[in-house]
Image: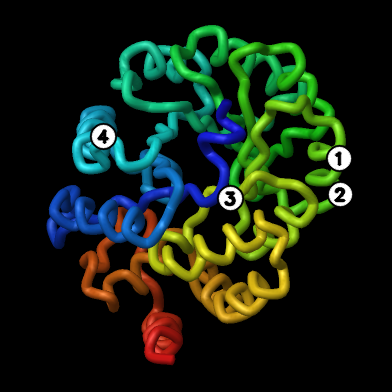
Amino acid sequence: MLREILKGTGVALITPFKSDFETDYDALEKVIDFVITGGVEYIVTLGTTGETPTLSRKEKIDIVNFTYEKVNGRVPVVVGIGGNNTKEIINDLETFPLNKAVAVLSASPYYSKPSQEGLFLHYKTLAEASPKPIILYNVPGRTGRNLNASTTIRLANDVKNIAGIKEASGDMLQCMQLLKDRPENFLIVSGDDALAMPQIACGMDGVISVAANGFPKKFTEMIRLSLQGNFKAAKILNDQLMEAYDLLFAENNPAGVKAAMSEMNIIENYLRLPLVSLSKNLHDKIKNYLAK
């Protein structure tokens, strides 16, 4: 069951680039080893934190295969495949290398702003075509449309191959409604690093994190303590990370976490347009935070 396999911390991997903006596979290997050694329970490749809108189809396939090779079975791998063209996503589901993946994470369609019925039929169609279980990804701040709790529960009950949701609406009432009404085996994880601890207190199974790229040991320990119900100890770690949450997302994601990881000498600090590196003032704040 995915609720057991993907319990804890998943990390939405960044995609490191070199100065010519080509994928830096040496750095990607370092990132993979860094987060696994740091304690993450699983890896999400081709999440939007990986700047997937700027990657070509070939680059995406190459990154998936490289990730499988370097992970080498140490932790489960989830592959991100989403977009606002249902037919094109089906083609990706049928042709991407998914044999070694445990699930597919699929962000809701962006820009189109479909109705709840459109969202239901979009995900139902994907689930019927997918060789792996689908994890819904609700992130209305980026897509422009919220996947309502009632639509999510309808999908969970009515569509066999939909196994969970990454919930990043930031709406705690909606989160609690999902947790109250979900089927027993339906995975619900946080998509908000700063809210993960209280959401686990409400019953979530873990988180798919950005911050875990740069702070895997402290973040994964905080999540494990939360899942054990030891919120007093978890809060101590979460309090130490709260400034990081603000800094990492102050301008854009993944510019914040890339700045931090470049200061750690894990990657070079390059992003593909339209994203750019952090302003000097914010970068200096991250540098000072790391020094503390």
Give how far across and how far down residue 176 sits, in percent: 84, 45
Distance from the alpha carbon under mark 3 to that under mark 2: 18 Å
- Crowding near the residue tagged with mark 2, few <14, some 14–19, many ≥20 C-alpha atoms within 10 Å: few
Residue to which mark 1 is pinned: 177
Marks counted in the figure total 4
In the image, residue 242 above or below residue 269 = below
Tell me the CA gap for discs 3 and 1: 18 Å
The alpha-carbon separation of the residues under discs 4 and 1 comes to 36 Å
What label sits on residue 207 in the rendered view? Answer: 3
From this view, report whether residue 203 is shown above or below residue 192. above
Q: Which residue is mark 4?
A: 68
Q: Mark 2 — residue?
A: 173
Q: Are marks 2 and 1 in contact (CB under 8 Å)?
A: yes
Q: Position of residue 101 (x, y in %)?
A: 38, 27
Residue 97 position in % (x across, y down): 29, 21
Q: In 3D space, how far apart are the residues under numbered discs 3 and 4 (Cα atoms)?
A: 21 Å
* 6 horizontally vs 11: left or right: right
Quarter of the image with the N terminus in it: top right
Give, as a three-letter code, the residue at label 4.
Answer: Tyr
Amino acid residing under circle 1: Gln
